[in-house]
Amino acid sequence: MHGDDLLSEINTKKTLEFLPATIFVSVVIVLGVLGNSISLAFYGWKVAKTSTNFFICALSAVDLITCFVLLGEVIELCYVVNFPGVFLCKSLYFLNQWLVVTSGMMLLLVAMDRFRKICRPLKWQFTERTCRLSFGVFVAYGLALSFRNLWTVNVISARIPDDELNQTVNGSYCTLDLQNYNVAVQFFNYIDLCTFVVIIGGSSVLYGFIVREIIMSRKRVDRFTRRIPNFVPSPSSSQAEKVIPNVRRNSSDISCSNSVVEAEKTSVSIDTASTPVYNSQMLDNILLRSGSKRSRPATNLQVKTSEVEKKITFMLILITVVSLVSFVPHFVVNLALKERIISARDEFTVGVQFLLRMFMINNAINPYVMAICNRQFRLFIKTSILGCKGTQTMEVN
């Protein structure tokens, strides 16, 4: 059999063998494009322009672009042993790494924003200018980290065996050029690992402080409630609304007019940076005047603000955990390949190819986590996307 015909036949066999991985990649891309498009529309145009919403919107935009670029993974799986061109090979690796690194760094930015809002509400916060600046810095970092793919990645020639015919043929596939750039590849692999450790370590530490602050706030509120012997909660307040007092009283708070309640119900913003979560300093100031007759329960809006902040934080923690876990198989397999635990021949098995692409879940899963945790987002999908009839009001939840 002619060499080109044999190579084409081997490639067809490999394409069919990799069909489960190809289907997985295609499903992830479709779900990612659909979910991130809806998320971008919601957080870009339907909610208030706050720092948290800006970062979520930017994350959705990056993930959406990444899903389109990941179409190259389908091409790679369809041309396993006869990849069509060097330029396409280098471009796919370059764009994939740039966008994936940027997406990961955005998760760290979101964690930093949550930390400032929950644990340091009275100090410096992200503004529109600093949001754009920090986003630009991380985009530039991802770009700089990805330039190495323009020379360390190449279409490598190799002898491709065919076990059925007991023959080998010259083939080509897109991968890292370890023969010519082994030292550079190992160096940048360590930088990639350090970047991943910074993202997962930094996010874990920041969310750890956030969870600790939420727990401590609840304990302080419980202690404060027990120290008020003449405290009479509002009949319309829930249990959560009975524990946080305000120091000052004004006519708008006393009246608790229906307009405040309606504004609360029809608000489409899930982020409430203007009303921070109570921290120790604010509660200590309240405790100093706990014996005053002017002490009274917090308004429904303030209590709901605190609960919304906690729900947003829980949603973002879940997004971060799911996204980072999706990278673990990719790093483990790459490390095994580098240490020769997995041979180069085993790299072309469907299981290894599947694990190498598990990181793609990071670019598709976020909108679906948001839909589970964010009631407004679900309502937006039902009313605006699915066209379901019903109330058009979006409650804060």
Image (cartoon, rainbow, N blue to C red):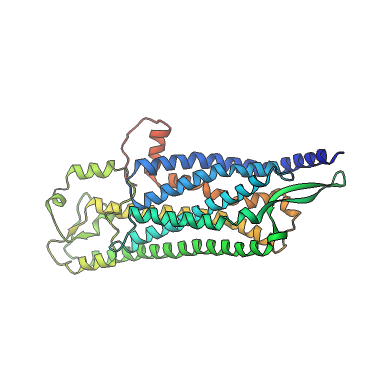
**Residue at left 38%, top 43%?**
44
In percent of the image, x 37 and y 54: which residue is there? 131
Q: Horizontal and vertical percent for residue 202?
A: 46, 64
- Direction from residue 291 to residue 347 in the image, left or right: right
Q: Position of residue 132 (x, y in %)?
A: 39, 53
Q: Tell me which residue sits at (61%, 53%) in the image.
A: 150
Residue drawn at x 53%, y 46% is 66
Between 190 and 246, the one lying in front of the other is 190
Give the answer, above or below, for where 157 lies relative to 381.
Answer: below
Q: Quadrant of the N terminus?
A: top right
Quadrant of res 68: top right
Residue 361 pos. (x, y %):
55, 48
Percent position of residue 4, x then y: 81, 40
Left or right: 375 as drawn, with respect to 242: right
Front-most of residues 66 and 177: 177
Q: How many marks?
A: 0
